[in-house]
Image: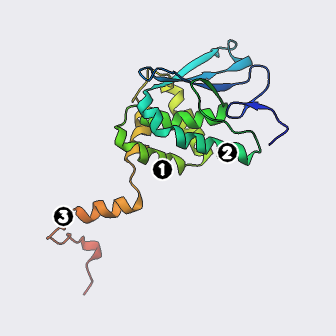
Amino acid sequence: MSERKTTGFGVPNDIDPHHFVVEIPAARANPVVITEQFGLTGGSNGIPDSIERCRIGQDAWNGVRKELERVLNDRLKEKKLTTSRWKSGKNQVERLLGRELCVLLWAIEAAPKETIPNAIRNWSGLKPEERWWLFAMAASMTGTSQDVDVGWRKALRVALTENPTGEEVVAIRAKRPKSTEERPQLPLFERMK
């Protein structure tokens, strides 16, 4: 597709690039582990070599893996880069795509399974820049695998899993009981005689 060589999901074929690794174990009982690898910049100026960003159960992972693969590959095709597929073992993901991936995984890591389709729909509706900003906000204080459902990570869960569609809002409003009392009028809005 392209003259630019990449590995995995768009990782530049350079010496030790900054990227993410999604490790999918063969044993279903083990979680999928997402790690940010800082590459050549890691290990200096206070930057660690890597940070484990997320551990997610395989049931939750399987709920999003196809959509993640589709979205990441669509983005790679836009840039005329080689696409990829998830496989057991280590899967490399370009650093910005990895940030976007984390936003979705952080939203569902503590969410009920039935809310995953809602999270996918809301995440898919975000622009890449919005996902990058959300990652930056969450990662600044709660960006490790131990920070499940805390601070911005909790906000991501609520925003992406509980945010209803327009049709759902109309249905919710229709179920609310109608008030039999009229609203009180403020004197400011009374007609002058």
Describe residue 48's horizontal placement relative to residue 155 as left or right. right
Label 1: few (<14), some or many (≥20) within 10 Å? Answer: some
Mark 2 lies on residue: 75
> Label 1 to label 2, Cα distance in Å?
17 Å
Describe residue 177's horizontal placement relative to residue 35 as left or right. left
> SS at mark 3?
loop
Label 2: few (<14), some or many (≥20) within 10 Å? Answer: some
Is residue 133 depicted above or below 45 in this figure?
below
The residue shown at (47%, 35%) is 62
The kind of residue on which mark 2 rests is: Arg
> SS at mark 1?
helix
The x and y percentages for residue 184 are: 20, 69
Mark 1 lies on residue: 121
Dots 3, 1 in contact, CB < 8 A: no
Residue 97 or residue 191, whichever sits in front: 97
Chain-order first, disc 3 or disc 2: 2
Q: Quick check: can you spot residue 83?
A: yes
The kind of residue on which mark 1 rests is: Arg
